[in-house]
Image (cartoon, rainbow, N blue to C red):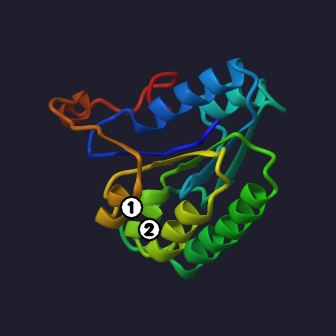
Amino acid sequence: MKGYIQVYTGNGKGKTTAALGLALRAMGAGKKVLIAQFLKTGNYSEIKALSLLAPHITVKQFGAPKFVMKKPSPKDKQIAQKGWKNVETLIRSKKYDLVILDEINVAAFLGLIPVQQILFLMEEKPENLELVLTGRNASPKILEKADLVTDMREIKHYFSRGIKARMGIEK
């Protein structure tokens, strides 16, 4: 089966959640899934749940304990580049049917991963690999190269009323 490239971007909530839903669907169909999370690390609720689905779903995290929001440190760049090399190796192994690069668009926007590297991966991915890139601020070049683009647009969000992330819903 031919694999396509999907991008979930925009300023609205739900990009990672949509990708995780796709991971569950793929796993249910007997596919092997890799979720590589850039810019984040930690034992979030979804990570706890996904660990129960190993070895069908593999999760790798490439981020510092604190999510990078504005100016990344040299350590952030080092972690992201190490993660990128890891992802390239795992994709070349052809072990996975679905690879989700969570927050990769933000990593590119912040200059941690060059857009050219992502475009090259998109071009050279195995034919049967489904590739999903999530995160706000996706490069127009990435959007142009993708087969499917979903823009999650925030219309209203309770965070603007000061409501913090809730366990099991946002974290």
| Residue placed under numbered mark 1 in the picture | 142
Residue 148 placement (x, y as % from top left): 38, 42
Residue 106 or 23: which is nearer the viewer? 23
Give the residue pinned by disc 2.
108
Residue 56 on image: x %, y %: 79, 30
Sequence-wise, which precedes: disc 2 or disc 1? Answer: 2
State which quadrant residue 81 falls in: bottom right
- Residue 151, x across and y down, in percent: 28, 41
Task: Specify whether 113 is left or right of 48.
Answer: left
| Kind of residue indicated by mark 1 | Ile
Q: Which of marks 2 and 1 is in front?
A: 1
Image marks 2 and 1: residues in contact by CB distance under 8 Å? yes
Residue type at the position of mark 2: Ala
**In the displayed structure image, the side of residue 11 where residue 27 appears, left or right:** right
Q: Which mark is residue 88?
A: none
Q: Where, by quadrant of the figure, is residue 155 drawn? A: top left
